[in-house]
Amino acid sequence: MTIKKDKFSWYQQQQVEYGAFEGWNQQYNITHGFSSRKGGVSEGCYKSMNLGFASKDDEKLVNENFRRFTKALGIQKDNLVLSDQTHETNIRVVSEQDTGSGMTKPKTYVGIDGLITNVPGIPLMTFHADCTPLFYVDPMQRVIGVAHAGWRGAFSGMASKMVQAMKEVYHCRPENIQVGIGPSIGKCCFLIRHDVYKHVKIFPKYVTKISKANAEQWRLSLESVHENFLRLENIPEDNIWKSNRCTFCEADKFFSHRRMGNDRGNHAAVMQLNQ
């Protein structure tokens, strides 16, 4: 099968819509996806596939959304391992003992924005509403990872640190790692002011891909930041996949913190090694 780079497609199963990098599931014997707003049961600002337990949505509806989303992808809801996101770059090496953490039992960890594992049958999940989902797979070592990264995580090098963790723990080689940069707020809509700019201006422009929008604001491409950090880790350009989707622009498909504020749903990024 020929895989097309930078190809992120939408699929629908049982009325549930999710995005995935084309060819990955078949080529690498994994299951992965990124939820859209469609196919759930939540209402109002959470309509309809809200996967955020931290929201003010009815917990029963969120649970039903989880059931529908995981069923559509063919993964076991009770086996999920959930992140504990704090906009940091801490990474959890997930073992069989973690199965169900955050779903069927309390988490034993805090401040985890990245998850990696080599154990089949354990779906790893992070949560998003403008911040970038990062998907990692090494088909040679049979290792996967998912991460959450907003602008803080981006400039703290989350994209790099996931690669470093995969190398250190599982002896992965950069040339074998495929990385998918999922939907996030795009440069078209991510306007930052000086309070953020002062943190990012210390980086060279080839990393930030930042540009002046007006007298008080700059445009920032999170996708480009992640991409350039990956290149610093010697991930080949051909191994970096981009969704090229803006969560702010497409209101019918995405929740967006910038567009909606705190009263909105969350998307989920999930990945599992299959047997």
Image: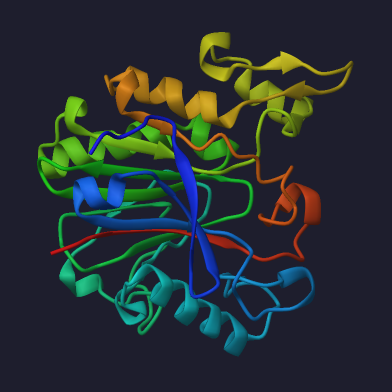
Q: Is residue 190 visible?
A: yes
The spot of residue 7 in percent (x, y) is: 44, 36
Say which of 26 and 231 sits in front.
26
The spot of residue 178 in percent (x, y) is: 28, 35
Residue at (63, 25) in percent of width and height: 199
Residue 111 placement, left or right of 204 = left
Position of residue 29 relative to residue 74, above or below, is: above
Position of residue 66 relative to residue 135, above or below, is: below
The spot of residue 111 in percent (x, y) is: 44, 57
**Tag count in the figure?**
0
Quadrant that contains the N terminus: top left
Please identify the quarter of the rendering in which residue 203 is found: top right
Q: Can residue 111 be seen in this view?
A: no
Quadrant that contains the C terminus: bottom left
Residue at (40, 79) in percent of width and height: 103
The spot of residue 38 in percent (x, y) is: 62, 66
Residue 206 placement, left or right of 270 = right
Residue at (63, 16) in percent of width and height: 201
**Residue that sits furthest to the front in the current view:** 1
Say which of 174 and 10 sits in front.
10
**Residue that sits furthest to the bottom in the current view:** 60
Residue at (31, 39) in percent of width and height: 162
Say which of 148 and 4 sits in front.
4
Position of residue 65 relative to residue 190, above or below, is: below
Colouring scheme, one of rainbow, by chain, secondary structure, one colour: rainbow
Residue 107 placement, left or right of 139 = right
